[in-house]
Image (tube, helix red, strand yellow):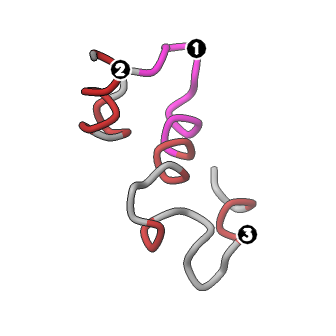
């Protein structure tokens, strides 16, 4: 049930380990957006947005 509730809250409610850099967390969160139109790689530049991410 706890996992289910976390899924409902979305990716922004996840606490990532400190061993993952800020840029890494940002990349993961942008790739896991609920709305596909908001996901990194879905916009006009597509895969180039992912490649150029910090």
User: Is residue 8 toward the left or the right of residue 30 in the image?
Assistant: left
Please provide percent x and percent y for residue 52.
70, 62
Mark 3 sits on what residue? Answer: 47
Give the numbered dot on residue 52. none
**Tag 3 near tag 2, CB within 8 Å:** no
Q: Earlier in the sequence, mark 1 or mark 3?
A: 1
Mark 3 against mark 2, which lies toward the viewer?
A: 2
Q: Is residue 29 above or below residue 47?
A: above
Graded by Cα atoms within 10 Å as few (under 14), some (14 to 19) or many (20 or more), the crowding at tag 1 reads few
Could you tell me residue 41's position as x and y percent?
A: 62, 68
Helix, strand or loop for disc 2: helix
Task: Where is residue 29? Give x, y as percent.
Answer: 46, 44
The quarter of the displayed image where residue 7 is located: top left
Q: Confirm whether the magenta stretch covers residue 20.
A: yes
Q: Is residue 23 above or below residue 4?
A: below
Name the disc covering residue 3, or none: 2
Q: Quadrant of residue 14?
A: top left
Identity of the residue furthest to the front in this view: 1
Q: Secondary structure at mark 3?
A: helix
Magenta range is 16-26
Which residue is labeled 1 in the image? 19
Question: In front of the other: label 1 or label 3?
Answer: 3
Tell me the distance, in whole angstroms, between the alpha carbons under discs 1 and 3: 26 Å
Q: Nearer the viewer, residue 50 or 11?
A: 11
Quarter occupied by the N terminus: top left
Side of 3 where 43 appears, left or right: right
């Amino acid at each position: 049930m706890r996992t289910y509730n976390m899924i409902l809250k979305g990716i922004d409610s996840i606490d990532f380990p400190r061993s993952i850099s800020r840029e890494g967390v940002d990349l993961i969160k942008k790739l896991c957006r609920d709305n596909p139109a908001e996901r990194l790689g879905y916009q006009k530049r597509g895969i180039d947005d992912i490649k150029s991410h910090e």
